[in-house]
Amino acid sequence: FDTDNRLFPRPRDPGAVETIRDQFVVFPNLTPFGDPQLVADPAVRNDSLYQTPEYLLFTQGPPAKFNLRLSYVATGGGDRSTLLLNATQIREETEQIFVEGRRLARGIDYSVNYDLGQVTFLDPDALFGNRPATVTARFEQRGFFAIAPTSIFGLTTRYQLGEWGGINLVGLYQREATAFNRPPLGFEPTASLIGGVSTDLRFDVPSVSRFVDRFTSGRMTARSTLDIDAEVAFSRPDPNRSGEAFLDEFEDDQGIPISLRENAWSYGSRPASANGLEALGFAAGFDSTDAVQLTWQNLIPDGRGGARDLRPTDIDTNIVIRGGNSIGTETVLYMTFHADTAGGVVARDNSAAWSLPRRDFRPRWRSLVTPLSLTGRDLSRNEFLEFWVFEGADRPVTSNDMRLVIDLGTVSEDALALAPQTFTVSGGDTTFTGRGYAGVGMLDTERSPTGTFNALTDDIGILGDRPLLTLPDGGEQLVPLCRRSLSNLVEVFPWGDLSARCSVGNGVLDTEDLDGDLLLDARGPTEDVFRYVVDLNDPKYFVRTGVQAVDPTDSTRVAGWRLYRVPLRDVDRTIGQPNIRLVKHLRVTLATPPDNGLPDPVIRFALARMRLVGAPWIARADAPIEG
């Protein structure tokens, strides 16, 4: 709640999907438990609630001292005589219904519709009274469709023994396969055999007639017979024809997809430490003067007047779509790591309105960042960071010895943005000069102080797209260097065009505030990250190749996709005190070693299908535990 008692976040607010559990009430701009006007007793007043360090938020706190009196309107859940189990095709007589720990009796306390999964309490007033009650339901559910093939064989026959009668045989055999290659417990292939034998035999017994003749005065003429009518039945169920079952198939990876939408990423901060990159020319740290322009985009031209569309089958050869089913397009992030001479302002004739001097024998770097969670995501069950990389036939990433420096944890929000310092106007041409860094030490955001964003009035751009420039007359002014116009047409820029990224008028909230707290580095500039320095030439990261395209004029030139996997347990450097259960940000820094005095090459590559993968089981140790 804010000061006007409005409930946040509203559906249109950024981060509204990341809701807090409904047992919390948050006062973002009030301190009722530390207000001396509300809590007069200083012994009871507790202002430390609002000064708790972030890493202690999930630890056990002091006992409660305050009560909140809330007035609200609540609506009931309807008729309490019925309970929907949210399941259909329940196995008959498998349900167990408990009320406050007491098991209810079917037919006495309740009735159940197995097909609909609905329980009806016969006397709810006697069961629940006027008090809240906890109802626990346990049951088994049948598969809605019989996806596993079932075979039934029957046999009935009679063997005639002449005048003595016959023997009847009957049998029924049912065999059910499984739809799983590794069937989990309860879904094994089953079988059942039911058989029976019946007889209707009649035998003449003349000896009985002769024996009875001895006790009668006349001769006995009736026949003596022995009738045998018998039935024997048996049942031989086989609950598991294969003799084995799997507790877990180990195919659920607990994957967390990382969005590669271009608006989900923003320019990152200058890494506070260069640990792990000393051999690459960064022994003295990341120098802001070595930062170069970096662009990323989701759309590039396809050469036919449209945008290039890729589907998963265009990336991964292991994905096969059968049956004519369609599949959506894949989100691909096309990256361009520019030379040190690239400025960032492009004129209407595609000429550079701002260029920078060469810096020979110097390394290059630039970073971008995406938030994983506002409060911290638990990655303790994730084992790898997996992504696909596209390189052209020249292999620009591997041939230029570029590193991907991946930082997982909490990073600084103060993004590094390049911007010119002055400009001059000559006729209809504007020329920009100098090199500066926009918004250093201050929060650049399009969000209003109340936490809202109005695209009509607030979409004015941030950082290098709207820097503070020195005017020709010596004054200073915020000058927008680019502009977008939202329309029915989507503009597609060439791969690596410096105009592809613009925060002015793009219709999206642009901000440095990765945590959504309207503060810049509220916990201080200290970074707590797990660092992975990824060399794509190192075979330990390479998994397999994907779709490849061979140059028809030179079979040695191959462009295509390659899958890489970074083990999260194999950390190259630990900076600060990161917590694997509270990972907020993913920052990717591109870094290349010093050049040999020649112009820097432009490095183009693409990323796709990035995700954090793991297992549903908790890793207790690196090796099996004896015993």
Image (cartoon, grey):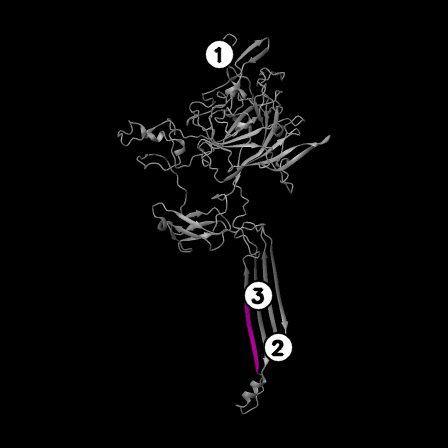
Q: Nearer the viewer, residue 594 or 567?
A: 594
Disc 1 versus disc 2: nearer the observer: 1
Instruction: Measure the C-alpha gap from mark 1 to mark 2.
Output: 121 Å
Callout 3: SS = strand
Left or right: 354, with 521 as reference point: right
Q: Which residues are magenta?
A: 224-234
Q: Which residue is mark 3?
A: 195
Callout 1: SS = strand
Kind of residue sitting beneath label 1? Glu
Q: Which residue is mark 2?
A: 164
Magenta segment: does it hold 231?
yes
For image coordinates 55% across by 70% down, the residue present is: 231
Residue 341 on image: x %, y %: 59, 18
Q: Nearer the viewer, residue 191 or 524?
A: 524
Question: How many numbered tags mark residues here?
Answer: 3
Work out which quarter of the rendered image holds the N terminus and state it. Answer: top left
Left or right: 494, with 568 as reference point: right
Name the outermost residue toward the bottom: 217
Answer with the quarter of the image where residue 218 lies: bottom right
Q: Which residue is mark 1?
A: 476
Callout 2: SS = helix
Disc 3 versus disc 2: nearer the observer: 3
Q: What numbered label is drawn on residue 166?
A: none
Q: Is residue 542 above or below residue 338?
A: below
Instruction: Measure the C-alpha gap from mark 1 to mark 3.
Output: 98 Å
Residue 450 on image: x %, y %: 42, 24
Q: Is residue 40 above or below residue 223?
A: above
